Amino acid sequence: MAAYHAEYIFHLEVAQVTRRFAYTLTACGLAILPALAQAPGLASVNTRLRAEETKDSQLMWWLHEVTDVYGPRVTGSPGLRAAQDFAVGQMEKWGFSNVHLEAWNFNHPGWQNLELEANAISPFQQPLNVRAVAWTPGTNGPVQGPVLIVEPPSPRRPRDAVDAAVVAEVASARA
């Protein structure tokens, strides 16, 4: 009886493994079908694309042109217009059709930071590190004025000092 029981268990395990194998084989077959159903001649197209990608790729050149040569491009600025003209010209060279810019009204004049310089002139001459805020109007020449002192925000108290302050407040409230 025990031998029959062991044989029955072995038969069940083999059946489960066989069923699992059949499911796995079916899933793999279904996963491969789309690859087999591709149009003929696609392999040569893929080979040519990969060769072009590795041999003659212009991706890094394009990225350099757009980011370094024509950037930054504030809306309405001459830099934006130059970048747009570059992109249109490049797409036409590549053979794209109907390449054009869409007309739109920004309702503001363009803005470009041509020159910005700030210096402390007294009691000693010292250049200052400054940045222009976009769309800031020009000054039509040099400007002099009083010094404006801007106090930096105070640093946050260290965590233990905050905890000590909270403990002191709680202790004083209980007293």
Image (cartoon, grey):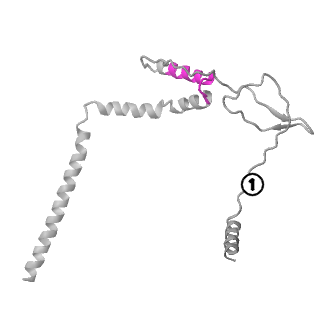
Above or below for 11 versus 1:
above
Q: Main secondary structure of the magenta part?
A: helix
Above or below for 65 versus 165:
above
Q: Residue furthest right?
A: 123
Residue sitting at 40 percent across and 34 percent down?
A: 50
Residue sitting at 16 percent across and 65 percent down?
A: 16
Task: Choose between 33 and 109: the one closer to the eye.
Answer: 109
* Left or right: residue 21 compared with residue 108: left
Quarter placement of the C terminus:
bottom right
Q: Position of residue 118 (x, y in %)?
A: 81, 33
Q: Position of residue 34 (x, y in %)?
A: 24, 40
Region in magenta: 71-90
Above or below for 5 versus 18:
below
Residue tagged 1: 154
Question: Image quarter for residue 47?
Answer: top left
Q: Let me know if residue 118 is in the magenta part.
A: no
Q: Amino acid at mark 1?
A: Ser
